[in-house]
């Protein structure tokens, strides 16, 4: 439900209605239908329900894992999202100019698809439309949370919406305001940061041949290049590219005109999908690993990029955040049933303890893949080739790798 001025009190205020904040609000409200807390989502940009320009829902595409599908399915949202996705039936991993390659298939792993590629704008439209139609979630946008201060009974938030300023009290604040959070700084949260000195160049491309629902992860001299299948549109064979290059090279790549970029891409990717016909507008994202040293305080929890920002090489950032959301919602549900305050430290602590293993595992998995696959020093090249070979030859290694890539976690 879209509102223009908030009430004075909410059980939960979500700061940021991006992919993580909006998903959290939906998953919580749909999981607690009979006793749903009073929820406000405040988002700084104007959310669109047709074509989005919201920062979270930009020109990128996201690979949703099989596990994320199950989470959206459990609240009845998958039906809407499914119309926008392209399933991945096969993943081909190869190292340009060297031996070693492997191919994972859905048949081998007994799943309908290994993952689902959705354009962020399409996911934004689904989530924002649902927010605007929800009876139980108040959606205030554009609205910027300027300040959060702890109070005995929760947190007060200072909100600026156009000409108006509001002060709201929340029993629990869910901070989902992304990787550059002035609020975190204001509250004195420390972040562990490691820059990879890499940028991701993002664009969409059309190819001569259909992708046949295959995703390609190709390790090129400049860094990993992911070519992800997109759903059919206007009869074009569309794919989304995520090309990791060094920070210095990215400036050069961004200056390439379309013909220069196509030539570079064709040379690095080869002819797997025939000729590259066209590329779209290019966008550039600096890449780093950043982890909040604390993710909870009384009446406050950090979710999504503000809690952990990962390199996109393994496509895990949103998928991990969705598993965090799933765990947090089940902890909050128990608190609601037992009539305990939602911002209670013991409640939030049990959420963090439950997710700690999953977070550590996927942060390590992503960080080691990034380092292994972004370097051409001799020992990394050999480890990489042995890795690809063991994936090809050892069923147990393939199973573990595929389960991690599909975001399937044993709890
Ligand atoms: C190139 C690239 C490819 C990726 N591919 C994948 C993938 O395939 N699979 C995957 O799982 N993950 C992927 N990721 C990671 C994924 O994009 C992130 O995990 C996800 O965007 C995190 O969403 P978020 O909502 O936490 O943050 P954001 O997307 O940054 O959203 C934060 C929201 O908060 C709002 N906001 C900020 N400050 C305020 C304020 N003070 N008041 C109100 N609102 C505020 C912003 O406007 C924004 O809408 C990729 C990332 C990159 C860079």
Image (cartoon, helix red, strand yellow):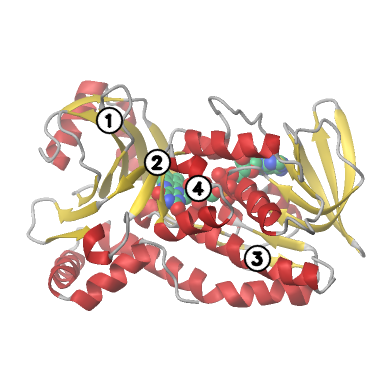
Q: Quadrant of the N terminus?
A: top right
CB of residue at label 4: within 8 Å of ligand 1? no
Q: Which residue matches tag 3?
A: 328
Query: According to the image, label 4 marks what residue?
Result: 78
Q: Quadrant of residue 388?
A: bottom left
Front label number (3 vs 1): 3
Q: Are marks 4 and 3 in contact (CB under 8 Å)?
A: no
Give the CA separation, mark 1 to mark 2: 17 Å
Q: Residue at x 40, y 58 (%)?
A: 66
Q: Between 86 and 150, which is closer to the camera in this rendering?
A: 86
- Location of residue 336 with respect to 51 vertically, above or below: below
Q: Is residue 138 above or below residue 323?
A: above
Q: Earlier in the sequence, mark 1 or mark 2?
A: 2
Residue 407 location (% of width, % of height):
41, 63
Residue pictured at 16% horizontal, 41% vertical: 269
The residue carrying mark 1 is 205
Q: Nearer the viewer, mark 2 or mark 3?
A: 2
What label sits on residue 317 in the rendered view?
A: none
Q: CA distance from mark 1 to mark 4?
A: 26 Å
Q: Earlier in the sequence, mark 3 or mark 1?
A: 1
Label 1 CA crowd tier, 10 Å (few <14, some 14–19, many 20+): many
* Helix, strand or loop under label 4: helix
- Between disc 1 and disc 2, the foreground one is 2
């Amino acid at each position: 439900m879209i509102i223009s001025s908030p009430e004075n009190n909410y059980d939960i205020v979500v700061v940021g209605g991006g992919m993580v904040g909006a998903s959290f609000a939906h998953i919580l409200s749909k999981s607690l239908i009979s006793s749903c807390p009073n929820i406000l989502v405040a988002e700084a940009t104007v959310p669109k329900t047709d074509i989005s320009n919201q920062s979270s829902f930009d020109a990128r595409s996201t690979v949703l894992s099989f596990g994320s599908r199950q989470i959206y399915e459990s609240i009845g949202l998958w039906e809407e999202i499914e119309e926008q996705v392209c399933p991945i039936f096969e993943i081909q991993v190869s190292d340009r100019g060297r031996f070693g390659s492997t191919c994972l298939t859905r048949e081998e792993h007994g799943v309908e698809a290994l993952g689902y590629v959705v354009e962020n704008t399409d996911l934004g439209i689904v989530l924002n439309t649902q927010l605007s139609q929800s009876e139980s979630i108040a959606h205030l946008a554009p609205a910027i949370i300027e300040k959060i201060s702890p109070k005995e009974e929760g947190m007060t938030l200072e909100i600026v919406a156009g000409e108006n300023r509001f002060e709201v009290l929340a029993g629990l604040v869910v901070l989902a305001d992304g990787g550059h959070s002035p609020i975190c700084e204001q509250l004195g949260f420390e972040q562990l940061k490691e820059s990879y000195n890499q940028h991701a160049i993002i664009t969409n491309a059309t190819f001569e041949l259909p992708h046949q629902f295959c995703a390609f992860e190709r390790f090129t001299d400049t860094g990993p290049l992911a070519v992800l299948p997109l759903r059919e549109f206007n009869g074009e064979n569309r794919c989304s590219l995520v090309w990791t290059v060094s920070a210095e090279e990215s400036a050069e790549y961004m200056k390439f005109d379309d013909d220069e970029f196509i030539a570079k891409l064709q040379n690095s990717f080869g002819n797997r999908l025939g000729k590259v016909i066209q590329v779209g507008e290019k966008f550039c994202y600096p890449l780093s690993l950043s982890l909040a040293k604390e993710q909870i305080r009384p009446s406050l929890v950090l979710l999504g990029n503000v809690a952990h920002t990962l390199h996109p090489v393994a496509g895990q950032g949103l998928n991990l955040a969705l598993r965090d959301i799933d765990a947090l919602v089940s902890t909050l549900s128990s608190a609601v049933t037992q009539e305990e305050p939602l911002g209670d430290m013991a409640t939030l602590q049990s959420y963090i303890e439950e997710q700690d293993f999953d977070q550590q595992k996927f942060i390590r998995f992503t960080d080691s893949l990034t380092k292994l696959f972004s370097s051409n020093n001799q020992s990394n090249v050999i480890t990489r080739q042995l890795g690809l070979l063991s994936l090809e030859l050892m069923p147990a290694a393939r199973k573990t790798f595929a389960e991690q890539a599909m975001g399937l976690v044993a709890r």
